[in-house]
Image: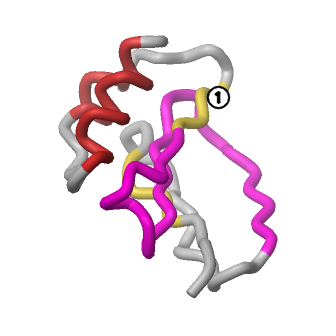
Amino acid sequence: KGHNVEFVAGPDGANLPGKSGLNKEVVVAFDKPGVYLYVCTPHKVMGMIGLVVVGGDTSNKDAVAKAKALGKSKKKLKSLLGEL
C-alpha cells in the first residue's frame, strides 16, 4: 500500500494537519509549540509512529501519552515520550 502521515495528537488548540495521501511528500508548518504525535496509518499497529517537538516545549507530553495507540505503537510511544 505505501506510507502516509496522520497527526493524531498535539498541543491544545493546535490545528492538526489532515491525513496525507499514500506515498505523498508532506510539508507541515507548526504554528504552536509542543509535542505532536503522528502515525503511518497503514502501519501504526506495527509501531510506525513518531513525535515532533516544536520549540522545545514538552509541556503536553502527558496528554500525548493518553492518545490511542494500537499494537506495537503503545510500547513505542511510551519509549519515545520517555526520551523527552
Look at the image and tell me in which quarter the N terminus lies: bottom right
User: Is 23 in the magenta?
Assistant: no
Give percent across and percent down for residue 3. Answer: 61, 73
Q: Is residue 59 left or right of residue 23?
A: left
Of residues 44 and 20, the one drawn nearer to the viewer in this rendering: 44
Amino acid type assigned to the residue bearing label 1 in the image: Val
Taking the spot 64% from the left edge, 28% from the top edge, the residue there is 54
**Residue appearing at x 80%, y 71% in the figure:** 25
The structure residue drawn at horizontal position 52% and vertical position 57%, both measured from the top left corner, is 15
Whether residue 3 sits left or right of residue 34 in the image: it is: right
| Coordinates of residue 62 in the picture (x, y in percent) | 26, 23
The relative height of residue 83 versus residue 31 in the rendered view (above or below) is above
Image position of 8 with respect to 25: above or below: above
Q: Which residues are magenta?
A: 25-50
How many marks on residues? 1
Asked which quadrant contains residue 64, the reply is top left
**Rendered image coloring scheme:** secondary structure
In the picture provided, is 33 more to the left or to the right than 66?
A: right
Q: Quadrant of residue 57?
A: top right
Is residue 46 one of those drawn in magenta? yes
Q: Which residue is mark 1?
A: 54
Estimate the x, y position of residue 60 in percent, counting from the top left.
Answer: 36, 25
